[in-house]
Image (cartoon, grey):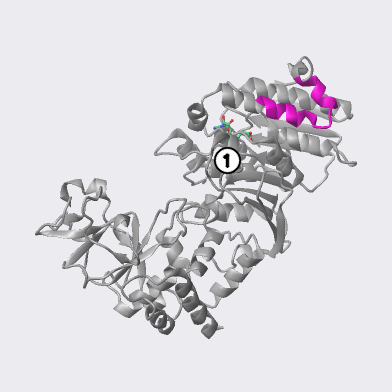
Amino acid sequence: MVRDKNTDGDGAAHVCESALHTEAGILSCIDRARRAFSMATSRADRSAIGQFLTPAPIARFMASLFETNVPVARILDPGAGSGSLFAALIEQLISKPSRPECIEVVAYEIDQNIVPHLEKTIELCRQLCAETGVAFQGIVRCEDFISAAVGQLHDNLFAAAQDSFTHVILNPPYKKINGETQTRRILNSAGIETSNLYAAFVWLAACLTRPGGEIVAITPRSFCNGPYFRRFRKALLGLVNLRHIHTFESRKQAFADDSVLQENVIFHGIRNEDRRGTVRISVSIGLGFRDMQVREVPFQEVVVPDDGDAFIHLIERDDGRQVMERMSRFGTTLAELDLEVSTGRVVDFRAREFLRKDAEPGAAPLIYPCHFEDGFVHWPLKGAKKPNAIACSDQTEDLLVPAGYYVLTKRFTAKEERRRIVSVIYDPTRIDASFVGFENHLNYFHSRGRGLPPDLARGLAVFLNSSLLDRYFRLFSGHTQVNATDLRKVRYPSREQMLRLGCEMKTTLPDQGRIDAAVERAHSENG
Ligand SMILES: C[S@@+](CC[C@H](N)C(=O)[O-])C[C@H]1O[C@@H](n2cnc3c(N)ncnc32)[C@H](O)[C@@H]1O
């Protein structure tokens, strides 16, 4: 259904009329409605449509990032929910001495349950603008933003850019785009390839931003690195000049009311502007943004110029810069070490018929993260929930590798785990087997599909378990997943340094202090 509501009069805003005249403004009233809406609806229903509403302090902060003054402000809020984002922006715009003469808002929203709240917000904004002599037009479009935006982009190839927006503000729905859906087909028709709705929203919203116009979005941090968002990152960085990126110290903060545990970022960019050279990076601990730390860093430190993957590094503090500097002293690629890293080949639910609970003749060890202990693989694990072995046969041949020294890392770490990168050695002298299977929840370092020289394996395990690498990794990875692609991008100590590091590893992993001191020595020998 498309219901354009051009509000110009008898709206239902009486509920909050008093808010117009209080210092807290209309946003505090909209925020009360947001909380009431969240209480009255089920979290599961909201989650199904990716609906996590922005609390007022975050909406205000996002609005504060817009920089330019224009006489006619055209605001787009795709996936507007109850409208707190554009309301915060309007409050901000009209509080300036050089306020716009005219404000127009286009808000897209598909959830019929929240649309009455959205319409109330539009009405409040209309009243607020009327009081300050600003002409206002509010349009609620109850339709799918993806189809509408793609349609508009196709039309705009021939039309003037008058339909584009000077201000785009969004908190898009977070949801996977699964399989061959209509959404995916529509996106493909516009050359937009991404697996999450939030990236599709931001990509389209950036396309609808006028040259010189501004976009502010709050999204998961996951797009900053990793292979899945590569195309999106490159498209976004091509469309807008990043000016500010804000992160939250704790994953619980941004959407605490909805118990959303996820790392979020807020970014601000200007469409097609010449690169100014620096990006502000800020981090806040609470919702108040009072304790915010801000740094201005060269754009090349955020996106390294020759990085074909265009990872976005978020160096939030000075020690982040130190970590980057210290890591930059290690310049050896895995290829130079004659090493590769791959994801474990055994996807257990696909190989169910070959899995064996315990070691048995004719079966190879099958290694899971539960076999990690103190720097080495401890196998078999009696009473484990996971199988210990996989039958050797023609069908499983390709899933196995010949016995040898391999260095393994977990692909997923629990959030409470101290380190993101947890690494151990598969030592063939401890396990009597000719072949071994590595399960898909692991990455394994190998040399052309075979094991590594033992000293190199020890050195690599020490380096991978170091605090320096862990801190470096956290600079660009917003999630607890460690992909083989991420490990391929890391620069490692030279072979000689690795061999020296390997001397630290005897029969167990040395304590953290010793590991870090050894990596520090290797690093200073390089500097
Ligand atoms: C994460 S919520 C954010 C809402 C609001 N912008 C805020 O910040 O409070 C995303 C909103 O997008 C809406 N939505 C989901 N899919 C949509 C679509 N295809 N088109 C338009 N809106 C959509 C949801 O109903 C939800 O209200």
Residue furthest out toward the left: 361
| Residue drawn at (54%, 23%) of the image | 41
Q: Is residue 222 above or below residue 312?
A: above
| Residue drawn at (82%, 26%) of the image | 20
Question: Residue 265's x, y, as percent?
Answer: 61, 49
Between 370 and 227, the residue placed more toward the observer is: 370
- Could you tell me what secondary structure mostly forms the magenta stretch? helix
Question: Residue 73's x, y, as percent?
Answer: 79, 38
Residue 4: tell me if it is visible: no
Question: Residue 149's x, y, as percent?
Answer: 60, 36
Is residue 441 found left or right of 140 in the rendered image? Answer: left
Question: Residue 311's x, y, as percent?
Answer: 55, 60
Residue assigned mark 1: 201
Q: Is residue 344 above or below residue 42?
A: below
- Quarter of the rendered structure image containing ligand 1: top right
| Residue drawn at (55%, 37%) of the image | 173
Between 213 and 519, the residue placed more toward the observer is: 519
Q: Is residue 93 above or below residue 394?
A: above
Classify mark 1 as within 8 Å of ligand 1 or not, answering yes or no: yes
Q: What is the magenta range? A: 16-33
Query: Which amino acid lies under the numbered mark 1 shown in the image of this protein?
Result: Phe
Q: Residue 360, located in which quarter of the rendered image?
A: bottom left
Residue 138: tell me if it is visible: yes
Is residue 189 found left or right of 358 in the rendered image? Answer: right
Identify the image quadrant of the N terminus: top right
